[in-house]
Amino acid sequence: MEGALTARDKVGVQDFVLLDAYTSESAFLDNLRKRFSENLIYTYIGTLLVSVNPYQELGIYTVSQMELYQGVNFFELPPHVYAIADNAYRMMCSELNNHFILISGESGAGKTEASKKILQYFAVTCPMTESLQIARDRLLLSNPVLEAFGNAKTLRNDNSSRFGKYMDIQFDFKGIPVGGHIISYLIEKSRVVYQNQGERNFHIFYQLLEGGEEELLAYLGLERDPQLYKYLSQGHCAKESSINDKNDWKTVSNAFSVIDFTEDDLENLFGIIASVLHLGNICFEENQQGWASIPDTHEIKRIAKLLGVHPWVLLEALTHRKIEAKTEEVICPLTLELSAYARDAMAKAVYGRTFTWLVNKINSSLVNKDFTGKTVIGLLDIYGFEVFDKNGFEQFCINYCNEKLQQLLIERTLKAEQAEYEMEGIEWEPIQYFNNKIICDLVEERHKGIISILDEECIRPGPATDLSFLERLEEKVGKHAHFQTRKLAGPKGRKRIGWMEFRLFHYAGEVTYCTEGFLEKNNDLLYRHLKEVLCRSKNRILKECFRVAELENRRRPPTVGTQFKNSLSSLLEILISKEPSYIRCIKPNESKEPSKFDDFLIRHQVKYLGLMEHLRVRRAGFAYRRKYEHFLQRYKSLCPDTWPHWHGPPAEGVERLIKYIGYEPEEYKLGRTKIFIRFPRTLFATEDAFEF
Ligand code: ATP
Ligand code: MG
């Protein structure tokens, strides 16, 4: 235990379970604030780590800090992300089982930084052989590549991950990192074609323009100025002082060479990236018949060259649509609006699939077939609960994902608590908690859940709209206790719900979703005509991304919602078989400033992260538990029987010790290997006695 307990009035307690008023949100916040003002950004809730983004370099990630945490008992040092990493690693090595570390929190809270710190910790502290250094370097360097293609500047975070990421780090039986595997979730493709004011497209576009060699840019037909590209200029902030695209380009180029990308891979890859930019600059005009045409074919020719497709076929596919009638195909011209839609859909599809290709490519370089019987530590860096003024399909998916993860956490924490009490032979009463399975079912249940209802609307013949989807919801889940619309909320509805909106009562609070765009985003349609062009592309990467077999398969591909549901279900399967650790990240303020603790904002996150609930579960039984040896070691000086040495069994030593210092029977229980203390005050009194 750290000496911090004696100074707890000033720096708070290092573990929230030691708070007396553990059900009080204000006490929770006070503790967090005290610690934050002392630059103590980490606090535990039992074994869960709460981290507040300091927005400044604190000098706590040095190699000597890493060494400090190596192999040390979890609670003996101040809370740290290294302690979580080290604990998972030690347990994996000693018990030869698999672990995962789930990092969650809202945008800008520090998830990605935390996951990088963990990866660095393993890279520095794990044993290593010369031949495996390359595996380690690839693991480390997969980050800048994925960040270049999957991260972007948003209003909330200059380096915001626009995809969810799960990464397995594989270790051999000696604890050497030997390989890895990455799974990505739901990349935000819409960013490729549109960015809000003050936001940017994915970093890679700017890196290429700023840092790319003259020769490369000439080959790609690109100019350096991002303002020349529609897909890069809508947010009006192509240049951002905190981002050095030129340097980042060098880092990414170096990473590409370590991760085994060939010249040919890169030529194809940047051919695609450049094509996306050229696509964005295609302008349509209305011809005399009122249909879309492309008068300037410059861009078309460039794209055709880079993607290895025929320019006139591409032009036709961007301005026409193939409709399959019973016996023949009919080609219909498109309106201006639909042509623009087709162009953007093509850019999004190409980028999205290329991102998946990139992840696969990185994975193939991280595979290490020489090692069997590996154990893994998985790192999950995934979007936290999102509530904005206007919430759409993306927030719906993200919040659904958080419901599922919350379910896992509650189940696992409760189960772990229960298992520990049972193992130690301690009586306990079941803990009351809110089981959010009911909300998960509301979203995902087959035929009945919101995703199924949405899918049905998407395939229904006839004019389905976002409004008709809402009506279907009202019809089918309108009476559900966790669902509401304006029609059903009635005049007593507390907060206003708009015509196109529905509200879900999530475990973390209520969120109102606007159904506008749900159908389109769930369908994520790419006209068949364009798909044909892409399937026939000579670009090697596109060939892998768009298989001809896809054209032959007449069945509709699964919708985005269903795909996401399936990938979440596989993720949960991956996680459920592993031992969990949790890191909950908190963003202290909206202005990215150091030392600014915005009470309102943080209170909100404490709620959405389910921290009070977690603390309640953790505290329902006993606030504190320690192995007899450790307890004795710490407090033996308080009792003449145990000082300076106790030679009998530790359990007996502890019994004598607490009898001597006068613990009341209701204050503690003795388990098989541990002492359980019910109230923090008991421990504090012992700690204070020990200080004097
Ligand atoms: P998103 O969901 O948008 O991807 P995130 O939770 O991954 O957000 P990060 O990118 O990890 O957020 O953090 C945002 C920024 O905050 C970082 O770029 C860095 O400047 C700062 N930051 C985060 N964690 C730390 C830390 N431990 N120490 C110093 N600065 C930090
Ligand atoms: Mg991130």
Image (tube, rainbow, N blue to C red):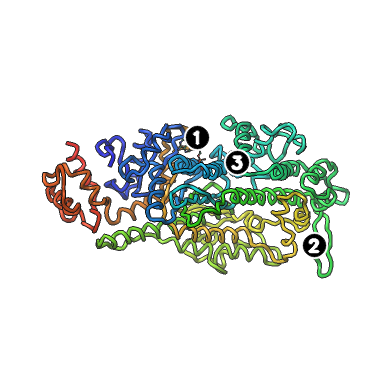
Q: What residue do we see at 67% from left, 56% from top?
A: 524
Quadrant of the snapshot with the N terminus: top left
Q: x and y percent of residue 466 in the render?
A: 64, 58
Q: Earlier in the sequence, mark 1 or mark 2?
A: 2
Q: Residues within 10 Å of mark 2 (few under 14, many from 20)?
A: some
Residues at marks 3 and 2 touching, judged by CB atoms closer than 8 Å: no
Residue pointed to by mark 1: 591
- Of residues 139 and 103, which is closer to you in this image? 139
The answer to whether any part of residue 593 appears in the image is yes
Q: x and y percent of residue 452 in the render?
A: 58, 65
| Distance CA(mark 3)–CA(mark 1) | 36 Å
Amino acid type of the residue that numbered disc 2 sits on in the rendered structure: Ile
| Distance CA(mark 3)–CA(mark 2) | 46 Å
Residue 447 relative to residue 29: left or right: right
Q: Residues within 10 Å of mark 3 (few under 14, many from 20)?
A: some
Residue 3 relative to residue 347: left or right: left
Q: Quadrant of residue 8?
A: top left
Per the rendering, the mark at residue 323 is 2
Q: Tell me the mark number nearer the camera, choosing from 3 and 2.
A: 3
Residues at marks 3 and 1 touching, judged by CB atoms closer than 8 Å: no
Residue pointed to by mark 3: 258
